[in-house]
Amino acid sequence: MGRRNGIMSDQLKEEIAKELGFYDTVKEEGWGGIRARDAGNMVKRAIEMAEENVSKQDEL
């Protein structure tokens, strides 16, 4: 089986990695070089961002 296409864009993943401080690892080793904890934190932050966007839209 092939890998599934990711839901998050590369741009968003890079933005979050920079925000969380492990983008240098991504640049040097690729996404496979990050720790599981960092990947989990990245997903958590993406969910927070999505929830913030939904809140803003609900206010309109």
Image (tube, rainbow, N blue to C red):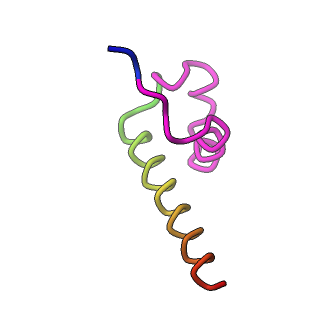
Residue 30, quarter of the rendered image = top right
Report the residue at 54% width, 42% height from top.
8
In magenta, the rendered stretch is: 4-32
- Confirm whether the magenta stretch covers residue 25: yes
Residue 32, quarter of the rendered image = top left
In the image, is residue 44 above or below residue 4? below
In the image, is residue 10 above or below residue 2? below
Report the residue at 38% width, 45% height from top.
40
In screen coordinates, is 56 left or right of 6? right
Residue 60, quarter of the rendered image = bottom right
x%, y% of residue 46? 51, 53
Report the residue at 44% width, 41% height from top.
38
In screen coordinates, is 27 left or right of 5? right
x%, y% of residue 41? 43, 49
In the image, is residue 5 above or below residue 58? above
Q: Name the foreground residue: 26 vs 47.
A: 47
Report the residue at 43% width, 39% height from top.
39
x%, y% of residue 35? 40, 33
